[in-house]
């Protein structure tokens, strides 16, 4: 239903050029619920605005049902069936909003791209998960793959930080360090300076996407030796 091909988005302000989104390619199939997660400032909301037409990409293409809508206005995209709901919480007495969204998706065979930090919501609702970090997709796969076999060190840390029902711990795991400054992004893996799983290859340029299964992809040097490398994700 929706395809993003090498989407990038930069902005210029008084502090310099900011790299907000960098070379993102992904597909959202018809009738599926795709969850986008990652740290604050990772580019998730900007990606949604690019899809909706609120912002225009610096590079790349956006296809909707095979049609190039990259330069279509927000109104034109809305007429074609693309809508954007802001993040402010909406509550209905006795009704869960997520159930309404899922029922609507199934009724009209639409797709939903849902941005959330709530791993419980992702586990319950999503078919596919896209993990973003510092403006890039670092991992994507089915919800079963991401939760059962997280591959990127950031995703592994994210899963380790979630509370487990029935398991008492003194302190939840917290990923050390912080997201890099978008004005001065490194030319190596953006997570390297926070990573506790580095290998010698991590000294090189930003890692390409590696395919772990037909639906599971990760950008990490830890998988270069035994898997095929794909294009950037």
Image: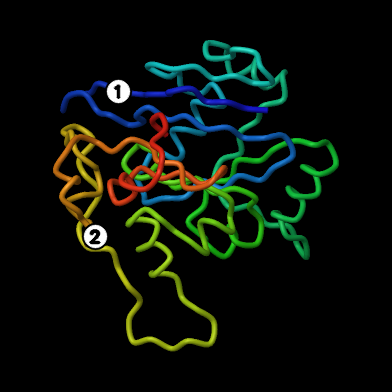
Q: Is disc 1 surrounded by few (<14), some (14 to 19) or many (20+) residues within 10 Å?
A: some
Viewer-proximal residue among 8 and 5:
5
Q: Indicate the quadrant where residue 183 lies.
A: top left
Q: Is residue 42 left or right of residue 62?
A: left
Residue 211: image tag: none
Residue 11: image tag: 1
**Residue on which disc 2 sits:** 197
Q: Is residue 146 left or right of residue 59?
A: right
Q: Position of residue 125 (x, y in %)?
A: 66, 56
Instruction: First in sequence, mark 1 or 2: give its number.
Output: 1
Q: Secondary structure at mark 1?
A: strand
Asked if 219 appears above or below 7 in the picture, the reply is below
Marks 1 and 2, how far apart at CA: 32 Å
Q: Position of residue 211 (x, y in %)?
A: 45, 42
Residue drawn where x is 43% and y is 33% of the image = 46
Quarter of the figure that contains the C terminus: top left
Quarter of the figure that contains the N terminus: top right
């Amino acid at each position: 239903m929706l395809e993003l091909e090498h989407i990038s988005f930069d902005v210029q302000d008084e502090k310099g050029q900011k790299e907000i989104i960098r070379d993102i390619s992904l597909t959202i199939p018809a009738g599926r619920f795709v969850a986008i997660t990652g740290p604050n400032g990772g580019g998730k909301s900007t990606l949604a605005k690019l899809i909706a037409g609120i912002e225009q990409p610096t590079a790349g293409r956006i296809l909707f049902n095979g049609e190039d809508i990259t330069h279509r206005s927000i109104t034109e995209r809305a007429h074609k069936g693309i809508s954007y709901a802001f993040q402010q919480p909406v509550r209905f007495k006795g009704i869960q909003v997520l159930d309404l969204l899922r029922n609507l998706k199934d009724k009209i065979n639409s797709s939903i791209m849902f941005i959330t930090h709530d791993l419980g919501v992702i586990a319950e609702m999503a078919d596919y998960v896209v993990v973003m970090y510092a403006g890039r997709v670092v991992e994507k796969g089915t919800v079963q793959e991401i939760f059962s076999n997280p591959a990127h060190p950031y995703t592994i840390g994210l899963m380790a930080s979630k509370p487990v029902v029935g398991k008492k711990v003194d302190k939840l795991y917290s990923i050390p360090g912080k997201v890099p400054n978008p004005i001065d992004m490194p030319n190596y893996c953006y997570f390297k300076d926070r990573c506790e799983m580095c290998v010698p290859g991590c000294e090189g340029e930003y890692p390409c996407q590696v395919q772990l299964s037909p639906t599971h992809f990760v950008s990490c040097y830890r998988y270069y030796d035994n898997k095929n490398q794909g294009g950037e994700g």
